Image (cartoon, rainbow, N blue to C red):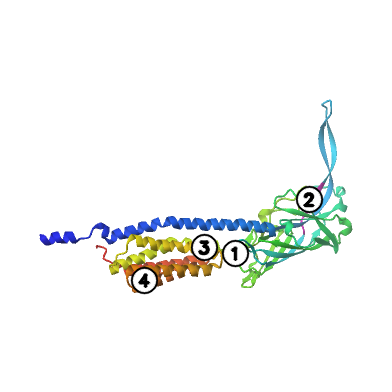
Amino acid sequence: MENQTQNLQQKPSFFQSNTAKMIMVGLLCLFLLIPLELVKGLISERSQRKKEMTQEVNTLWGSDIKFYGPILSIPYYSFETIEVVDANSQRTTQTKKVIKNAYFFPEILNNYSNIKKSQPLKRGLYENVVFTSTMDFNGNFEKPNFDKLNINPESVIWEKATVIVNTTNLKSIKSDLKISLNDQFFSFESKSNNQSNYGVLESNQFDYNTLQNQDKINFKFQMKFNGSESVQFIPIGKTTNVKIDSDWKSPSLMGTFAANEENKKVDSTGFHAEWKVLEINRPFSQQYEESVPNLNEYLFGVRLLETVDQYQQNERASKYGFLVIGLTFLVFFLIQSISKINIHIFQYTMIGLALVMFYTLLISITEHSTFSLAYLIAAIAVIVMIVLYSISILKNKKFPMFIGVSLTALYSFIFVIIQLEDYALLVGSIGLFAILGAVMYFSKKIDWNS
């Protein structure tokens, strides 16, 4: 009887059991999600600030380039019937002669563009990647068919024909604008446009009948732009051929029409891409009257952006914050349970806050260096701090060294996942599976009944 009483007195309370300690550590992990979310908010705020600065720099240097042309514009007389009310409220009809325009797309449209990355523009802490583009255009216009538009050829004003080009980024054009029409040169002038986001360049007037050669007008011109983000075209030729060469290493081909796979090349020196779009590939006409339609939905081209910028990398790293905290606490808990060394919940809290500080160090150092260097410095600082703190807690060097190696392996594993794109999920799943296996192996030594 006396022995039973003694055993009951020696039995530890629930709050001293491994189960209770595990619950407390788990609750602490959840609590540390609060500062971790604050860090994620800081990353988002800094990222938004960079986007604002990027937009400001793009506005000054040159934004994305969208090209829609060249288009042959020929005016014609049209007669409109209007109703007129005189002073005696008598209604009469009158015929009014007005001038309208008919628009014709090219038969052949060829473009060759060379895009070169320019020196990054720096604004405060932020650098914005921009480019210069040289675009060469050539092709021809066939004899306009006014019958398809139900326009009387006798009402056509052939001597006032022009060629127009719609493009964004007019202020960033860096070349004299002249177009060769059957070996005669005509200057472009800018004019107002009711189409949103596009500016209009219109050539000097010419006499179509005098200029034409075998019912064709061959054209050729070059444009140089400062730009950023993307270069896109609308395939208005019956046959449209576009070729792009660039020293950009990570392009994103985009738009309604896919590039020819057999001619596409992307390597460490840049990329080459080609498109061929036929009239049958796109559902719009070759001629219009009165106005040129908005065909933005048929844009295609290339987007030139950094695949993963520093804030995206920081954001991806912070998403693994809960995993790092949880696994680090698990290592300490296993050491505590196996070695019977008591670790106070306050000490767990200090370790957790040190792990959260990794992300504030990471983003602050990244803004002044590369992400890789910032990650290395922040990881070393946090690992050294936790190892030194562990030595004072565990009173030996064996377990702290094991913790240091574990954290090094964990941070290295996460860095590899962040750098990967296509295989991030695969490598992450295999790594987590291996970690789970290790935890299962070491946890078998724990007496869960104590």
The residue furthest left is 1
Confirm whether the magenta stretch covers residue 105: yes
The Cα atoms of the two marked residues, 1 and 4, are separated by 40 Å
Which of labels 2 and 4 is toward the front? 4
Residue 306 — which label? 1
Left or right of residue 257: residue 153: right
Which three-letter amino acid code belongs to the residue tagged 4?
Answer: Pro
Determine crowd level at label 2: few under 14, some 14-19, many 20+ residues with C-alpha closer than 10 A: few
Instruction: Specify the quadrant of the image occupied by residue 392.
Output: bottom left
Q: Position of residue 6 (x, y in %)?
A: 14, 61
Image disc number at residue 442:
none
Which disc is residue 148 wearing?
2
As helix, strand or loop, the secondary structure at mark 1 comes to: loop
The image quadrant of residue 272 is bottom right
Mark 1 packing: few (<14 Cα in 10 Å), some, or many (20+)? some
Q: Is residue 51 above or below residue 120?
A: above
Q: Nearer the viewer, mark 1 or mark 2?
A: 1
**Alpha-carbon span between mark 2 and mark 3:** 62 Å
- Relative to 247, 33 lies left or right: left
- The residue carrying pointer 3 sits among few (fewer than 14), some (14 to 19) or many (20 or more) residues within 10 Å by Cα, namely many
Image point 80% across, 59% down: which residue? 141
Judge depth for marks 1 and 4 and give the one in front.
4
**Which residue corresponds to the image point at 19% horizontal and 61% vertical from the top-left?**
10
- Residue at the spot of label 3: 363
Q: Nearer the viewer, residue 291 or 134?
A: 134
Specify start and end residues of the magenta stretch as a single range: 100-106
The residue shown at (12%, 62%) is 3
